[in-house]
Each structure stands twice: as structure tokens, then as C-alpha cells.
Amino acid sequence: MFQTLQCHILFNNKKTGLHLKQKYSMKKKFSIYVTVIIFSVFSSSCTKERYIDEPGNLLPKTVMEDENLPSLTVNGAKLHSEAFGPKDSTLIICIHGGPGGDYRYMLNCKTLATKGCRVVFYDQRGAGLSQRFPKSWYKSQGSDALNKIFYDELKGVISHYKTSSSQKVILLGQSWGAMLATAYTGKYPNEIDGLIVAEPGGLKWDDVVDYISESRSFKLWSETLNDATYIDQFMTGKEDQHEILDYKAGLMGSTNAIVGDVGSDLGNNAPSYVASRSGAVVNAASYELGQDTKPDFSAGINNFSTKTLFIYSSNNKAYPDSWATKISSAYPNKEIFKAQGVGHSGMLNQVDFWTTTMEPKIISYIQSL
Amino acid sequence: MKTFTIKSIILIASFSFFQNKISAQVINWKNISKQNKHLLHVNVGAEYGVTAGLGYHHLIPIKSFPLWIGGEFSTPGGNKPADDFKLRVCAQIRIAALNHFQFSARVQGISRRFQNQSVTLFNFGSDFAGTLGYYRKHWFLGAEAGFDKAIVTHFKHSDWYKENIYFNVQDGWYEPATGGNFYYGLQGGYSMKKVDITLKAGKLLQQDFKSQPLLPFYGQLGVNFRF
């Protein structure tokens, strides 16, 4: 268009010969043309208003906005959840990390259904595609918050999928999910028939804080740290603007070189819809509640005499052998397994490693119970 | 709302392209002269990350209202030097002077970019600030307060994001304003014949007056070269 405009001016110059006044007029016209062009370019860029806090724009909708998502309602919350495998066989309850992660990265565990297990996935309250709650709700639960938010919810999920009192229940938790699984088993040791924990960060609150610091000790000049902080001048969200806060949290959480996470590889286990979402508010609220109540996630686990399968990874620099030894010491009866060549989430989210190493290990554990 | 956005973009873009000069963030208003109308500014510090910046500004003496116009380019740390940056064009004018006390105002047009594995953001914003200070020939100290608004932001998500996080994400310009932060703090400096050493530091607060950015403070050490 610019070339057309220039040709147009040249043509007029040759044909008529311009006086100064005419030249001035042409310059003025040219300015008008340029203004129109700029206006047009930006107009076409803004053909539709988009709001960063509108569900579905930047992040997938939750079960509250999308009724097609598989869900269940327990403990006053609508949770994104699905299960695979024979309904009456051993229940494997997969518990994701965070708080505020989602179960998508654990979907390789779905293949346990083909080995005769009933595999259950659920996004915790406020996380993944489950229902959101305001931060004030979490904070209002007071000293009993962990019970009301997480343990009662897990109890409800187990109850929803359990078809008989004799059906075995095995908890499989990763990271925060492993801490939650441990705490629940310590609270209800007679209701759990097997426990698989993959890198619980810590079980005593001080250990949890130490692990978080260690696993996020990014260098001052690093790309990761500056990406995490730099975006705050582009987007800001109020305390309960979940769409914005979840989006920003998700941008930070995809990879982490310190813990050896490289992103999920689910192969054919990936669902037909690509929809993953962080829960920023439940994450922040849980940490604040932890600071207030200093919970001990290992309480009562000494009463669980069944063997626990304790897994940690070689690529997680924040989880050396010494840390694994320290954290696993809480379990009275355990088998420790070091997953070689993968990181914090890679134990479950790398399909090749899952198929060749992790799945056989877990099946062997289940058979040993 | 669409009209507002387009106007904002054109205003800021026009300001960026046609002024094409920059002002330093921290100026000793008592130590300026018509012989040194040019000012080169380098700085390192923390502002939504660890940053380094380079700026140039030019003095337009308007009797009692000296006006600096110019700009600054800054980028945060990281192993990808050009993926994130901020370009500011600025006009800074002294509005009032009483003995050694002076009050100045600053308006900035901002264009900035952010890129990571998931998304590339490009934003047009504005920044309005005021500074009240005590200025002597060789030193100065002042307090500043301002508001940085992210007016419109363009989102372009990566294939990785669409394949791993959300396949139906909507790319394009987002409005109304996607963010805003207040800031307030102190600034000061020591001035020599043609060089100023400047320092400023303060707090950041999101526009809801409750939430804080992940890095809730800013600080900057700078050097001005006048010529």
C-alpha cells in the first residue's frame, strides 16, 4: 500500500509540475494517508474485545463453566474427576501435587487400569479444573483447615468410588500429593491398604519450607526468576481473580531445571482435550495456612504397618540421597526406590520411563500387598 | 472500549516514534545548564526483575520550566537477552521551585515485551509520576510516587502451550487494561562537574492496593553523563 501511495505521488509530480502550495497540500495528504494506514492496522488488530478474566480465553474453563467435563461433588465442592478400569477392583487414588496442580501430568498411571486396577483421578478443590473458592474461605477454616480442605475431600472421593467395604484402597501421591497421602494414611491407617509416595517435599513443616526454598533457589540473573517477576507489570489480578492468577501461576510452573522437570510426555495417555490449569489461590492460601498452623504431615504414619513404596528421582537436585533418607525415615515399613534419569514429575509424566520402569515397579508393589 | 484502545496505541506509538528521545529517571534539577543539554544514563537495579538500562535525554530550556525529553531501554537478566525488554519514552518537567525545593512531573509511554516457553506478550502502557525533592548543586534527595498502567496487551501463545496447557487459548489484543502498579519511594544522588551518581528505591503495590508483585520493591543505581 505504501508503494502504491508513492507511485501515486510521483505520477502527479511528473504530470502536472507542482507549485509550493500544491507540494504542501501533497504533504498534508500524505500525512493523512499515513494516519489512516496506522489507524487501519491497529483497527484490524482490535476486531474483538477480549478480557483476560473471561473464562475460556487464556485458560480452560472449570467444571463450573463447562458441564461436559467429568465431575463429582464431595465435601461441598464440585471436582473435576474421572476413573478408569473395573469398578470393583483395587482402587488406586492418584493425588496430584501443588497444592494447586492438576492430575493431567499423572495420566500415564491410567494404564494401571489395563492391569486390573480401578484408577481414580481428581483435581483438588481450587485446583486444576475443579471449583474455585475465595482465599477468605480457606483462611476461615482456621486451625482445622487441612482436615476441612483436603482430608475430608479425599475421604469423600474414596467414598464416591468405593463400591464395597472389602475393596482395597491404595493412595498414589506425588510431591504435595505424597504429603497429603501420608497425612491421610496417618489419620486413617486402617482404611488404606497401600501407600505409594513420590518425593514428598517434607513431612514436618520446617522440612517443607526448606524443600521449597531449595527447589526454587533460582540464580538472581536467571531467565526463570526474571520471567516469574517480569510479568507482574503486564498483568495484575486481585486476590480472588482466579482467571488471572491461575494463568500467571501456570506460566511459571511448566519447567524447573532444579527439580529436573522438563514438561509432560503422556503419549497416548493424553486426554482428547488439552486443558491444564494451576490453582494459584489455593496454593497461596495453603502456604499461608501452613505458616500459621505448622502442620506435621507425618502424624500417625508410625501406625501404618503396611509397606510404603517411597520413590525419589535422580535428576531432582533438591532431593539428594540424604534428603530421601531423612524424609523416608517417618515410614515404619518402606521400600525405597530411586528413579534414575528423570526428575520430580518425570517419575510419572514421562511415558517411556513409566512404561519401562515405573509401571512394573508399582504393579510389583501392589502384588506384594 | 475499542476506540479507547486504538487511541491509546496511536498516542503512545506516535509519542514513541516521533519523539524518539529519552529522559533519565533521576535528575538533579539544580545542576543543569544550557551548555550540557545532553544526558546519557546507564543503570542497574531491580524492577520486576534484575535489570540493566541505557538511556539518553535532551534538555529543552523553557525559562522556569526546564523540560527533559528522551527515553530508556532496559532488559532483565536471563540467558535470552532480547526476549524481554522495556522501552520508555519520557517527558519530565519541573513544575514548581521554592528555594531548594522543587516539584517535577513525569509522563512516560511504555512499550514492553515478555516471552517464555508459553507466551509472547507485547504491551503498551503509560507511567505518570511526581517527585518532590530538595536539590543542591552537589546533591539532592526526593520522594517520588507514580502509577504504571498496562493499557493493552497482545498475547501470542506458543505451540507448546497449545499442545500442553490449553488448545483453545485465544490470541490477540486484550483490553481493557490488563494490569497496573503503584510505586513510591525515595531518590537521591551526588553530582560532580559532568557526572551524577543516582540512587532510587521504593515499594510496588498492585492497583487493588492489597496485592503485591512477586518482587515487591524496586531499586536502581545509575550514572548520568552530561555533555
Image: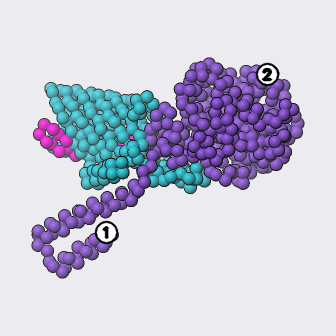
Chain colours: A purple, B cyan
Q: Which residue is mark 1?
A: A2
Residue B53 among those drawn in magenta: yes
**Residue at (23% x, 73% y) in the render:** A9
Q: Earlier in the sequence, mark 2 or mark 1?
A: 1
Residue A48 in view:
yes
Q: Looking at this rendering, what residue extends furthest in the front direction?
A: A67
Badge 2 marks a residue whose secondary structure is: helix
**Residue at (82% x, 44% y) in the render:** A86
Query: Please, is residue B54 above or below residue B97 in the view?
Result: below
Which chain is home to disc 1? A
The N terminus of chain A - image quarter = bottom left
Query: Please, is residue B225 above or below residue B155 in the view?
Result: above
Left or right side of B125 for A178: right
Residue B58 among those drawn in magenta: yes
The picture places residue B181, in percent across and down from the top left corner, at 39, 36
**Residue at (81% x, 42% y) in the render:** A87
Left or right side of B204 for B198: left
Amino acid type, mark 1: Phe
- Which of B30/B207 is in front? B207
Q: Which residues are magenta?
A: B51-67
The picture places residue A343, in percent across and down from the top left corner, at 68, 42
Check if mark 2 and mark 1 are on a common chain. Answer: yes
- Which of B138/A14 is in front? A14
Which chain is home to disc 2? A
Q: Quadrant of residue B138?
A: top left
**Residue at (34% x, 36% y) in the render:** B147
- Which of A311/B100 is in front? A311
Q: Which residue is mark 2?
A: A302
Answer few, some or many: residues within 10 Å of disc 2's Cα (few below 14, many 20 plus, some between 14 and 19). Answer: some
